[in-house]
Amino acid sequence: MVCGVFTTTNIPDGYQTSVIALYKVNLPPPDSVSSSQQADGTWTVVATWPPCPPSTSHTPTTRVPSD
């Protein structure tokens, strides 16, 4: 079961739509997906599912490695 908030940062310009699409194909799909452009031109994408049960843990933040 997918739950909680997942954030991907440092997404190069032009790739944010691919990251959004990858989040949306999850079953179940997220309740919401948003994106915002950062000052350096990269993007941050946030996908939100229902809250996780208290005993659940995950790594909710990933950073796309830069070249």
Image: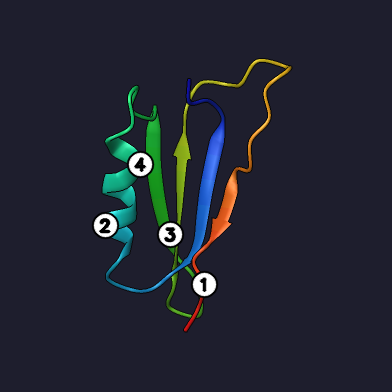
- Count neighbours of disc 1 (C-alpha within 10 A) and say few if under 14, some if 14 to 19, many if 20 or more: few
State the SS at label 2. Answer: helix
Residue 62's place in the image compared with 54, above or below, is below
Residue 54's place in the image compared with 32, above or below, is above
The nearer-to-camera label among 4 and 3 is 4
Distance CA(mark 1)–CA(mark 2)? 17 Å
The nearer-to-camera label among 4 and 2 is 4
Looking at marks 1 and 3 on the same chain, the residue that comes earlier in the sequence is marked by 3
Distance CA(mark 4)–CA(mark 3)? 15 Å
Residue 17, label in figure: 2
State the SS at label 3. Answer: strand
Q: Is residue 14 left or right of residue 66?
A: left
Q: How many marks do you count on the picture? A: 4
- Are circles 1 and 2 on residues that touch, CB within 8 Å? no
Looking at marks 3 and 2 on the same chain, the residue that comes earlier in the sequence is marked by 2
Which amino acid does the dot numbered 2 rest on? Answer: Thr
Which amino acid does the dot numbered 4 rest on? Answer: Tyr
The nearer-to-camera label among 3 and 2 is 2
Disc 1 designates what residue? Answer: 65
Distance CA(mark 3)–CA(mark 2)? 11 Å
The nearer-to-camera label among 4 and 1 is 1
Looking at marks 4 and 2 on the same chain, the residue that comes earlier in the sequence is marked by 2
Disc 4 designates what residue? Answer: 23
Q: Position of residue 14 (x, y in %)?
A: 27, 70
Q: Position of residue 37 (x, y in %)?
A: 43, 67
Distance CA(mark 4)–CA(mark 1)? 18 Å
